[in-house]
Image: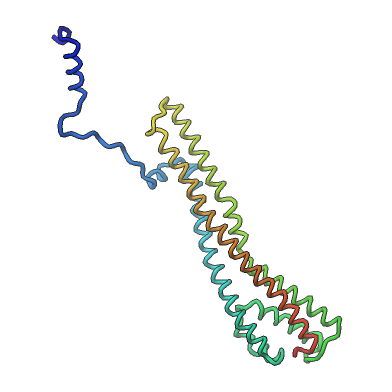
Amino acid sequence: MFWNQPAHALGAITASLAAPPSGASLPEPPKLDPVVLVLQASVPVKLVLLLLVMFSVTCWIVIGVKALHLARARGESAKFLDAFDRASGFAEIAQGLSAFRGSPFARIFAVGYDEMLRMTGGTLRKLDDAQGMHVESATRRAAAKEVSHLESWMSLLGTIGSTAPFIGLFGTVYGIMDAFLSIGNQQNANLPVVAPKIAEALIATAIGLVAAIPSVMAYNYFARRVQQLGDIMEGFAADVASRARMGGL
């Protein structure tokens, strides 16, 4: 009988019953899959992730469109400025103006040229001080308008870059709070209970950073490029006005 066996014999029997059979391996613990964690996440965390993914996609669309916009503006503006410097007068520049539709400098010149013709009744002649100031004011307004056009959609990049980390942080806070609630409800603080909730919370933070970092970098890059073009356009507007005072020579 077992109760008549010595203590060391009973210990050996218990150990043999608890030990797995020879050649058998213990089952591996389940591995956490990020995709599964996202699919099984709570509804608020899913909404946060969906919003951040939409932010990220929108960010890259705006970056692509704005990069093409600035590249075209810079390329055609370089060609127009070269033609502007080589032309003998405003009339020659105006004839080939349709070839530079993507250049903000061409549109500034068109505004100044139209205002000069309006002041002189359609003839190219020297302007007096009042007329020259009016043309200069018109070209400066046109330059400011072109800068605003170049800055279009950049505010969206700034908004995404500033808000995406906080939205991701909200998902993180909610996920950690959900993890603590699971601990309290199940009275169990083991890793299998806590790890999935914390992992899905950290995924929200990661996606928030993925959306925010390119937005901030692109915003800073485009802002610097637009500022450079804006400074050149301001000087160009004054140049158009000064040449208009001399009759467009």
In the picture, residue 5 is in which quadrant? top left
Looking at the rendered structure, the number of numbered marks drawn on it comes to: 0
The one nearer the camera, 53 or 5, is 5
What percent of the width, then of the height, locates residue 108? 70, 78
What percent of the width, then of the height, locates residue 26? 23, 33
Q: Is residue 125 above or below residue 177?
A: below
What percent of the width, then of the height, locates residue 206? 48, 48
Can you say which quadrant of the picture contains the C terminus? bottom right
In the picture, residue 158 is in which quadrant? bottom right
> Going 59% across and 76% down the picture, which residue do you hit?
74
Q: Is residue 47 visible?
A: no
Can you say which quadrant of the picture contains the N terminus? top left
Farthest residue, direction top = 4
In the picture, residue 96 is in which quadrant? bottom right
Farthest residue, direction left = 1
- In the image, taking residue 58 as reference, residue 96 lies left or right, namely right
Q: Is residue 17 visible?
A: yes
- In the image, taking residue 105 as reference, residue 121 lies left or right, namely right
What percent of the width, then of the height, locates residue 81? 65, 82
Q: Is residue 117 above or below residue 50?
A: below
> Going 62% across and 65% down the picture, which residue do you hit?
224
- In the image, taking residue 78 as reference, residue 204 lies left or right, namely left
Q: Identify the image's colour scheme: rainbow, by chain, secondary structure or one colour.
A: rainbow
Farthest residue, direction front = 8
- In the image, taking residue 241 as reference, residue 156 lies left or right, namely left
The one nearer the camera, 200 or 15, is 15
> Going 67% across and 88% down the picture, which residue do you hit?
93
